[in-house]
Image (tube, rainbow, N blue to C red):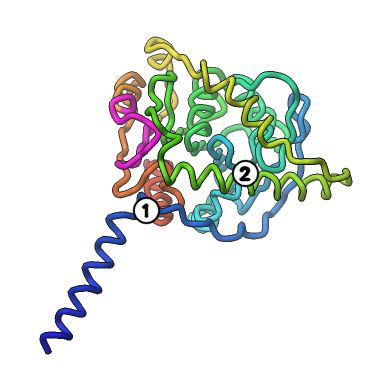
Amino acid sequence: MRSAVAALFLVVFAATAHAADRWMTLPEPPPMPAPSESGYAPVNGIQMYYATFGDGPAVLLIHGGLSHADVWANQVPKLVAAGHRVIVADSRGHGRSTRTAEPFGYDLMASDYVKLLDHLKVDKVVLVGWSDGGIIGLDIAMRHPARLTRLFAQAANVTTDGVLPNLDNDPVFGGFMRRMRADYDRLHAASSRQRGEPPAPSDYDAFVEQIGHMWASQPNWTAAQLAGIQVPTAIVLGDHDEAISGAHTDYMAKAIPGAALVILPEVSHFAMLQDPDGYTWAVLDFIDAK
């Protein structure tokens, strides 16, 4: 009897420890469901991959830097089941989308997404953005506010000093970087085949160098610019985010009029992978609020 109790204690302890440490994991997303529509939109000199799912009020999901649209595979079915049309895309140079020699910039990337909405004939969306996707969402909220009904910006920063130092030494972030290199090569090769183009050698390092120039100086928005945002906004951070400062997140929420501050429990920068159900419910709780 005593050994059975001890064994049960060890199982409970292991499960609790595993749950408590989920911010140290990097689960793979499942395969994306079959889209209602997918293709490549010609925007600002690039071919931008996109896919749409379901019907209803539109939700645009924008991934983070170096990532791609498939990171949202846990969220898409649940958002569709909740009555939304979901739109995902690969940002310029990411995943299946092409890029040009033009310098990366958040204004340009925001313009890409606005032109994608024009291509899809979608006037307004709820925007859910993660990391760079959240920064792009904030840019759209400032420069194209008529295109948004709500903004859920997770793990974004508005000045470069909002990023924590020593990310290169973080094991979870390092695992993410290695995964994105492999995903980049795989998705770029697949998109070349889809467009009938010969496969090209990997240029992942050149892509990282090009986007790295943007990260060195952008974003760099003032408190006055943030105070001009009128789109209902949630500023969101995992309580173990290894990339974005909590103090910086607090500043953002206070600087944007009426912004909600949402702290996701026991997750890091990669909350949509580590707690997919909790993440989706947090999104729906905000975007469907009356």
Front tag of 2 and 1 = 2
145 or 273: nearer the eye? Answer: 273
Q: Residue at x 67, y 47 (%)?
A: 51
Q: Residue at x 28, y 67 (%)?
A: 15
Instruction: Tell me which segment is drawn in magenta.
Output: 234-249
Looking at the picture, how far across and down is residue 223, in whole percent?
A: 37, 12
Q: Based on the picture, tell me whether residue 201 belongs to the magenta stretch.
A: no
* Corner quadrant of residue 13: bottom left
Q: Amino acid at mark 1?
A: Gly
Quadrant in the picture for the C terminus: top left
- Depicted 205 relative to depicted 83: above or below: above
Q: Residue furthest left?
A: 2
Q: Amino acid at mark 2?
A: Arg
User: What is the secondary structure assignment of the residue under circle 1?
Assistant: helix
User: What is the secondary structure assignment of the residue under circle 2?
Assistant: helix
Q: Residue at x 38, y 41 (%)?
A: 286
Q: Residue at x 45, y 35 (%)?
A: 168
Q: Residue furthest front?
A: 169
Label placed on residue 278: 1
Mark 2 lies on residue: 181
Number of numbered callouts drawn: 2
Looking at the picture, how far across and down is residue 43, in whole percent?
A: 74, 29
